[in-house]
Amino acid sequence: MRIYNRYILTLAVLFTAINVIMIALGQTSLDVYFAVLAIASLVVSLLYVHFSPGARRTLNAVAVAFFAGFLVVVALKVIDILYGA
Amino acid sequence: MASHKLAKEWAIKNPYRWLGFSLTLVGAIISPVFYFIVGSSPLSALGISFIMLGLTCIALANTRPPISPEASQTMFQTGIENIAALLEELGLSGKAIYLPRSLRDGRSQALVPLRQNGASVRISGKVAGRLIVRYGHQPEDLGIAVTTPGSVCVEALEVELGSSADGIAAALTHVLVGMLDIASSVSVNVIDSKVNIEVSNPKLSYENIWFYRSLGSPLASIAATVASEVFDKPVTVALERNLGSKSIIELEVLS
C-alpha cells in the first residue's frame, strides 16, 4: 500500500473512531468535535515524518489551517467564558 | 457523455484530487444541512471530518509528480538499459564505487573502474566531472562515472545527514519509504567498515543483469550513495540478497 493511501486510511479510521466515541460519550458541541479532529490530524501528520519534502510542506500548510481553526474555537470559548453568561 | 469521460480520465490521472473534491463537496453540503435543518451536532461533525479529509487529499494530490508511474517506469528502464549497454560495450564488469559529492565536483556518482576488483581501487583525490575519468596515478586507473538514482535522491534530500547508523537509517527511510515509496522500513547496522542494511517489503528486487551486477540493484545503489555521503568516503556494494519480503544489502566503506 502506498504511503499516501496509508496516511489517508489512518486519518479516515481515526476520524470515524473519534466521532463514534464522542457520540457514545454524548458530546453535542460542534466546537469540541472540530478541536479533537484537528488535534488528531496534527498528530497523525507529525507521525508521518518520512513524507517527501514537497508533501511535508503541503501537509504543514494544511496543519496550519486546521490549527488556526482550532485557535478560533479556543478564542471563541475564552470570549464566551469571560464575557458570556 | 463527454463530461463523464473527462471526469473518469481526471479520476484515473489523479485519484487523490478526485477523492478530495468529492469528500469536501459532500462534507460542505451535509454539514450545514445536519447542523441547521436536522439540528444534529454529531452528524455535522461527520461532515466536518469529510471536509478535513478532503482538504488533506487535495493537498496530497498537489504533491504527486505530473507524470504517471508507467511513464516513470519507462524512463527508469530506458536509463538502466542505456547504462547497461555502455558498460557491456566497454566490457566493464567490476563493482561500482559510489563517490561522495566531495570527491566528485558537487554531485555524488558511481565510478565503474576498468579493474575487475573494486576493493583494490584507491581513489587519489577529486575525480574530474567527466564521463571517462582517471582516479589514480597508474595507467590502468581509469573508469566511467555515471549518475545513479541515489545521486538524484541525495540532492533532493532536505534532511541533515547524520554520521552514524541512525543517520543512514533516517536518510534511507526518507528516500526509500517517504520519497520513492519502494519499501516499508529500513534498518541499518554498522560494524567497522561494513554497513549492513535490511530493507523490508522492497518493491524493486535484484535481477542478475549486467547493470545490477556492476552497480547493484536500485535499492543498493541508493543505499550506497547515501552511505558514501554520510561517511564522506567511497562505498561499494559488497553483497545483496533477497529473502522473501526482505532485502539484505551489505556495503563496504573504502578508505
Image: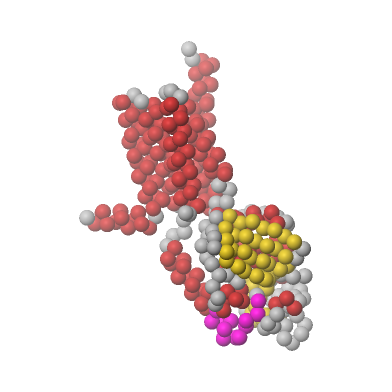
Q: Residue visible at 54% across and 43% down?
A: A45
* Residue A67 x, y percent position in the rendering: 52, 35
Above/below status of B211 relative to B29? below
Q: For the image shown, how many numbered marks are present on the structure? A: 0
Q: Which residue lies most toward the front here? A: B244
Helix, strand or loop for the magenta stretch, by majority = helix
Q: Residue furthest left?
A: B1
Q: Nearer the viewer, residue B69 or B107?
A: B69
Instruction: Say how the picture is coloured.
Output: secondary structure
Seen at 61% across and 86% down, the residue is: B91
* Residue A4 seen: yes
Q: Quadrant of the C terminus of chain B?
A: bottom right
Direction from residue B41 to residue B239 in the image, left or right: right
Residue extent of the magenta highlight:
B83-95
Q: Position of residue B46 (x, y in %)?
A: 39, 34
Q: Is residue A44 above or below residue A34?
A: below
**Can you tell which quarter of the image residue B31 is in?**
top left
Q: Residue at x 75, y 61 (%)?
A: B191
- For image coordinates 69% across by 54% down, the residue present is B166
Q: What is the x, y in percent for residue B195?
A: 70, 63
Determine whether A66 is above or below B207 in the image: above
Residue A19 is left or right of residue B173, and the answer is left
Reply yes or no: does residue B111 show up in magenta. no
Is B63 on the left-hand or right-hand side of B124?
left
Q: Nearer the viewer, residue B120 or A32?
A: B120
Q: Position of residue B226 (x, y in %)?
A: 65, 62
Please state, as top left, top right, bottom left or bottom right, where the N terminus of chain B lies in the image. bottom left
| Residue B101 seen in the current view | no
| On screen, residue B68 above or below A57 | below
